[in-house]
Image (cartoon, rainbow, N blue to C red):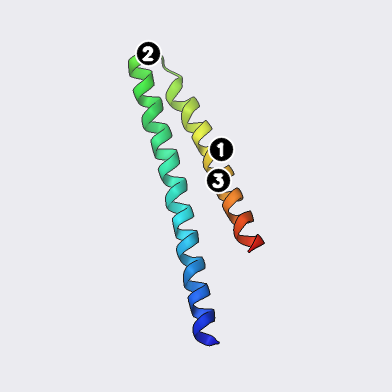
Amino acid sequence: MAKNKENGALKNWAIFSGIGLQMGLIIFLGNVLGSWMDVKLEKTFLEDTITIIAVFLAMFSVVYRVNRLNKK
């Protein structure tokens, strides 16, 4: 029984660390995309705008995955 509990804790730890990595990757890629679009379209606001959108998408992704995890 203790081994099963340890496996569950390890699995949850892996899931939560994956969620953190996913959140960081979404925000980073949003920033890179916004920076590239700023240069390509010769604008100055796209990097900030797309990065903020990426932050909200990352937060939505975290909430969705945690809710899905809680249902199990």
Q: Position of residue 45 (x, y in %)?
A: 46, 19
Considering depth in this image, is 48 or 27 the residue closer to the camera? 27
Q: Amino acid at mark 1?
A: Phe
* Residue 6 vertical position relative to residue 34 in the rendered view, above or below: below
Considering depth in this image, is 7 or 17 the residue closer to the camera? 7
Please give left or right for residue 68 compared with residue 23 in the image. right
- Ranked by sequence position, the earlier of labels 2 and 3 is 2
Q: Position of residue 56 (x, y in %)?
A: 56, 37
Q: Residue at x 57, y 52 (%)?
A: 65
- What count of labels does the image hold? 3
- Ranked by sequence position, the earlier of labels 2 and 1 is 2
Q: Quadrant of residue 25?
A: top left
Q: Position of residue 59 (x, y in %)?
A: 56, 44
Cβ atoms under marks 3 and 1 closer than 8 Å: no
Residue under circle 1?
A: 56
Residue under circle 2?
A: 41
Q: Which mark is residue 21?
A: none
Q: Residue at x 48, y 53 (%)?
A: 19
Considering depth in this image, is 13 or 55 the residue closer to the camera? 13
Question: How many residues crowd mark 3 within 10 Å: few (<14), some (14–19), many (20+)?
Answer: some
Q: Residue at x 36, y 12 (%)?
A: 42
Question: How many residues crowd mark 1 within 10 Å: few (<14), some (14–19), many (20+)?
Answer: some
In this view, the residue farthest toward the front is 72
Secondary structure beneath dot 2 equals helix
Secondary structure beneath dot 1 equals helix
Considering depth in this image, is 8 or 57 the residue closer to the camera? 8
Q: Residue at x 64, y 55 (%)?
A: 67
Foreground mark, 3 or 1, reads 3
Distance, label 2 to label 1, CA atoms, is 24 Å
Residue under circle 3?
A: 61
Q: Amino acid at mark 3?
A: Ser
Foreground mark, 2 or 3, reads 3
